[in-house]
Image (tube, rainbow, N blue to C red):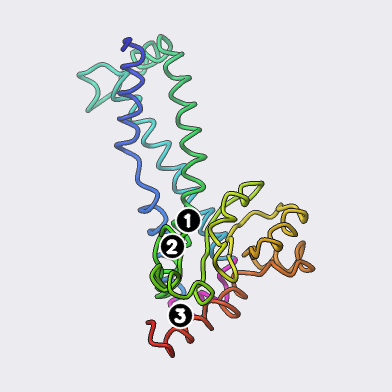
Amino acid sequence: MSKKEELLDKLKNEFKKRLPGNEELCRDVVEAVVEELGDPARIKERFSELVVGSEERVKEAYFAAEREAGSDALVRLFSAPQESHGHVDTEVLQRSLSRQWHVLDRFFLSVAQGRKTRAGYAFEWILRAFFDSLGYPYDWQATINGKPDFVFPRQEHFKAEPTDAVVLTAKRTVRERWRQIVTEGSKGYRFFLATIDPEVAISSIDEMLENRIYLVAPRQTAEGSYSRCRNVVSYEKFFELYLDPAMERWRNKGVL
C-alpha cells in the first residue's frame, strides 16, 4: 500500500469514527416528533408531512455531523502532532492540506458517495422508527421470495397465509428500481412500495398495477399528480384502508 493510500484509509477511518450511524440519527429525529405529538392517531393523520419533514431533518442533522466529523479528521491528520489536541497552527494545516490534494479529492468523493447511500437507508430507518413508535408488529428484511423491508405482522404468517399479510418495502426514489422487487410480492395479494419520490412515471405506475404493486406516497403527491392512479395511496390511506384493518383482523384471528 502506498503512503497516499495509507493516508486516505486513515482519513476515512477517522471520519467514520466521528460520524453517527443512520439508525441513531433517524431515531433521534422521529422520537422528537413522537414526543411532540404524543397521540398515535395524530401521527397517522399527519404521517405524510411527518415522514417528509423527518427526512429533511435527518438530512440537516447528517450534514452538520458530516462537517464536524470531516473537520476533526482533517485537523487530526494534517496538523502538527503537538497541536492536534490544542491550538492549531493554520499555516501548518494549510501547507499539509495543499500537499495532499489528490488524497483529499478521493476522500471527498468517498464522502459524497457515502452520503447518497445513507440517504436511501435513512428513509427506511425513518419508517421503521415511526412503525415502532406506533406499535406495529413486523419482521425487518425477512426473506420471503426476496427481501422486503417490512412484513406485517410476521414472516411466519406470510408463509402460512400470504394473502393475509401486508408486505411493504421502502425506496426513497423509485426510478426503474421498482422492478427489482416484483418477485418479493409475487405470492401476496398486494405488495406496497413506500416512497417520497414525487416524480414516478405514470407508465411505471401502470406497470406496477399489473404486478399488484401499490405505491404509497405523501398525501400531496398521491392526491395530486397521481389522483387518477388506482394503485397509488397516501400514507394516511395506507393506514386507514390496509394496515389498521389488517391489525384488527389479526387480533380477531389470534395472530397477535
Q: Which of 185 and 238 is in front in this view?
A: 185
Q: Which mark is residue 213?
A: none
Q: Nearer the viewer, residue 210 or 108?
A: 210
**Label 2: element kind:** helix
Q: What residue occupies the far left of the structure in this picture?
A: 82
Q: Give the range drawn in magenta.
A: 38-48
Residue contact at pointers 2 and 1, CB within 8 angstroms: yes
Counting from the top left corner in percent of width and height, residue 216 is at: 62, 65
| Residue at image coords 44%, 56% | 125
Q: Residue 124 carries which label?
A: 1
Q: Residue 128 carries which label?
A: 2
Q: What residue occupies the far bottom of the structure in this picture?
A: 252
Q: Nearer the viewer, residue 33 or 113?
A: 113
Query: Is 246 drawn above or below residue 52 in the view shown?
Result: below
Disc 3 to disc 1, C-alpha distance: 22 Å
**Label 3: element kind:** loop
Query: Is 10 drawn above or below residue 44 in the view shown?
Result: above
Counting from the top left corner in percent of width and height, residue 189 is at: 59, 71
Amino acid at circle 1: Glu
Counting from the top left corner in percent of width and height, residue 13 is at: 31, 30
